[in-house]
Amino acid sequence: MDSNNLNNENMNTTGAENQTQGQGQFSNQNQYSQNQYGQNNQNQYYQVPNYPVVVPGKNKAVASLVLGIISIVFIWGGFSGFVSLILSVIGLVLASSAKKDGFNEGIRTAGFVTCLIGLIGGLLALLACVACVGALGAVSSSREFERAADDFFYNFYGKY
């Protein structure tokens, strides 16, 4: 029985060693066939991350639209028509720069049109304010001129 026990022990140890070796082979194989997330590497393609697409000239077109809207708002403020002129000129430059960059969508056209409206309206508002100030100045100076003319003719001719 002793020899049978030895043979059984040898068989048990060799069987256990074979099982350990077999598990080691499979575990090594599993290490190479799976990535760090536990997914298989087979048929896996590189995926490009979803970064936002940058369209050249789009930011300039949006800026020209915003400046055009602000310049239209400033038309109604009297002498702030001067601010409207400055903003609309900057917006027109940005809209043309966006067109040079190759961005020719509706937002660029809308920015260009609003800046053009702001420019024309700003010019008209500024000219109207200058005309009003000039008219007020002319009225006050005409009264002084009338008094001076009356004094001159009264002194020159006496009573008229």
Image (cartoon, grey):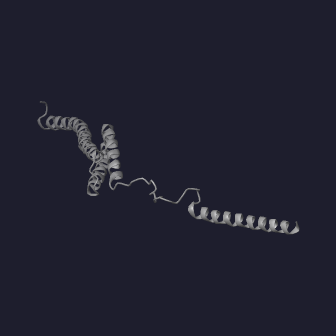
Whether residue 12 sits left or right of residue 25 in the image: it is right
| Observer-nearest of 54 and 32 | 32
In the displayed structure, 75 sits above or below 32; it is above
In the displayed structure, 25 sits above or below 125; it is below
| Observer-nearest of 2 and 81 | 2
Residue at position x 88%, y 68% in the image: 2
- Count of numbered labels shown in the rendering: 0
Residue at position x 74%, y 65% in the image: 15
Q: In which quarter of the view is residue 30 placed?
A: bottom right
How far across and down, in percent of the image, does residue 157 sit?
Answer: 11, 35
Which residue is outermost to the top? 160
How far across and down, in percent of the image, does residue 140 sit?
Answer: 25, 36
In the displayed structure, 116 sits above or below 102; it is above
| Observer-nearest of 73 and 21 | 21
Whether residue 144 sits left or right of residue 33 in the image: it is left
| Observer-nearest of 104 and 119 | 104
Which residue is outermost to the right? 2
Residue at position x 52%, y 60% in the image: 41
In the displayed structure, 11 sits above or below 72; it is below
